[in-house]
Amino acid sequence: MAEPGRSGTTSAPRAGADVARRAAGAAAAGCALAGAVAVTVAVVAGPGPGLTGYVSEAGIAGSGHAATYRIGILALAAALLLIGAALPPGVWAAAPALLATGAVFAAVSGAVTCSAGCPLPPFERATTADLVHGGASIAATASVVFAMLALAASGSAGPAVRWLAGGAAALALPLCATVGLAMLVLGRGTFVGVLERLVLVLAVVWGIATATTLALARGRGSAPS
């Protein structure tokens, strides 16, 4: 027979973990929003080529808004880590691992700046920094999309988180495939620039929505609904 008061003893740590996860979700939403605003300001206010160029061009050395851009990218990287920390118990381990991987690559992308125009093969000659920056950016995006798929397939994530992840992944996969193909066939230009921005906006909106859902969820002994 269970000892009197034992259930209350075990529920206290669960309640504390629930509060910590909700706090992580709220912090993730704040970081994602702040990061998105900072990057947007850097891109819009900077001297970049507009829609014909890459978002990363706002962070090149010598740009007046490079610091704002890097701060924004680091805030977005932090948001990915916090979303992983806010996920409920029992979620498929691949999801937080992929979010952490995406955060690391995003941080590398923000720390290693590309040269003017952010050139990439096969149409342009790229420096080592360009390749590192471009590779890290692609890896970060891919990690986030795969994390969406992992969450969509994880029953413990809860209906709301799974629905958000599945919907975002369904939109992101064809967009990412089109961007990759266009970069190889067309190279830098308006078409790639617009698609890149759509992918990034989708990822940020998903991050904010998911983080907010996790922050508002209660009773995390069960998944958010």
Image (tube, helix red, strand yellow):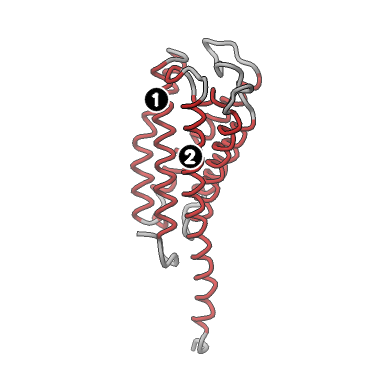
Residue at (44%, 44%) from the top-left corner?
207
The residue at the far right in this view is 128
Q: Residues within 10 Å of mark 1 (few under 14, many from 20)?
A: some
Residue appearing at x 55%, y 11% in the figure: 124
Crowd around label 2: few <14 · some 14–19 · many ≥20 (10 Å): many
Horizontal side of residue 90 vs 178, given as left or right: right
User: Residue 142 location, x and y as percent?
Assistant: 49, 34
Mark closer to the observer (1, 2)? 1
Q: Which residue is labeled 2 in the image?
A: 144
Residue 189, relative to residue 156: is it above or below?
above
Specify whether 178 is left or right of 138.
Answer: left
Residue 69: percent from left, percent from top:
56, 32
Q: On the image, numbered disc 1 is attached to which residue?
A: 195
Please, is residue 190 above or below residue 166 in the view?
A: above
Q: Is residue 13 above or below residue 176?
A: below
Q: Nearer the viewer, residue 81 or 190?
A: 190
Q: Secondary structure at mark 1?
A: helix
Q: Which residue is at the front of the view, 203 or 63?
A: 63
- Residue drawn at 35 percent across, 53 percent down: 160
Give SS at disc 2.
helix
Dot 1 or dot 2, earlier in sequence: 2
Q: Quadrant of residue 63?
A: top right
